[in-house]
Amino acid sequence: MEMNGFFTTFRPTLVGAWIPAVAMVLVQFVCMAIFKEGGKRAVDTSWYDAKTKMYAQWNSIFQVLVIILAVFVPFKCGTPWFTVGAVVYVMAFALFMWSFHSYGTADRDKLITKGIYKYSRNPMYAVFTLAMVGIIIATASLWLLLMMVPYCWAMHGVILGEEKYCEQTYGDTYRDYMKRVPRYFMFF
């Protein structure tokens, strides 16, 4: 594939990266509607300090920009890029659903350590990013890849703020959890 194939022409596409990207966002809203208590917990930012709030704002901005950019990024249908990316996306989508189920069915006042949270302290963030990686592969888009870099930076900042909050709220229980379970997955 020539290098120009990795850059989009910035023409809106009907069948492209926006479809799975928007699906990931819609899943969040649907799950928050189904699991109302978990949804309330997920959107409670009353404890954010100024730094976490700044990261959260940048995270939201970059997520919106990624979705806007995705409107202009077609899939590389019929290529190995598309096949590999689709497999990664489908796996991530399933994990994303599991993340929301684990979160939504947990006791609101306790540390969540069951379900997918046995394997990741931040599975929603991690698998959303993995799904976007699947989309990037399926489209072979350097533009999407470049846009995901600042998104991941901001997301990591939010996660650090959330971990600080969890440490203050759950104390030694959370510190023990941090020792057993990676921040993202495996050794990350």
Image (cartoon, rainbow, N blue to C red):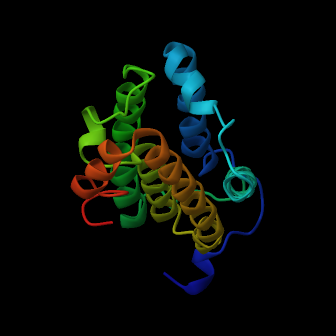
Q: Position of residue 124 (x, y in %)?
A: 45, 43
Residue 102 percent across, percent down from the top left: 35, 28
Can you give x and y, in whole percent of width and height, for residue 61 in the image?
A: 76, 54
Reply above or below: 123 against 84. above
Q: In this image, 113 relative to 18: left or right? A: left
Closer to the camera in the image, 46 or 20: 46
Determine whether 95 is above or below 28 in the image.
Answer: below
- Residue at figure coordinates x 38%, y 20% from the top left: 107
Residue 22, by quadrant, is top right
Q: Residue at x 43, y 53 (%)?
A: 126
Q: The C terminus lies in which quarter of the figure? A: bottom left
* Near-viewer residue (25 or 80): 25
Disc count in the image? 0
Say whether residue 48 is left or right of residue 111: right
x and y percent of residue 63 in the render? 67, 52
**Residue at the (54%, 39%) spot, across then down:** 24
**Residue 49 falls left or right of residue 167:** right
Q: State the residue in front, 160 or 171.
A: 171
Q: State whether residue 168 is above or below residue 46.
A: below
Q: Is residue 103 above or below residue 68?
A: above
The foreground one among 60 and 55 is: 55
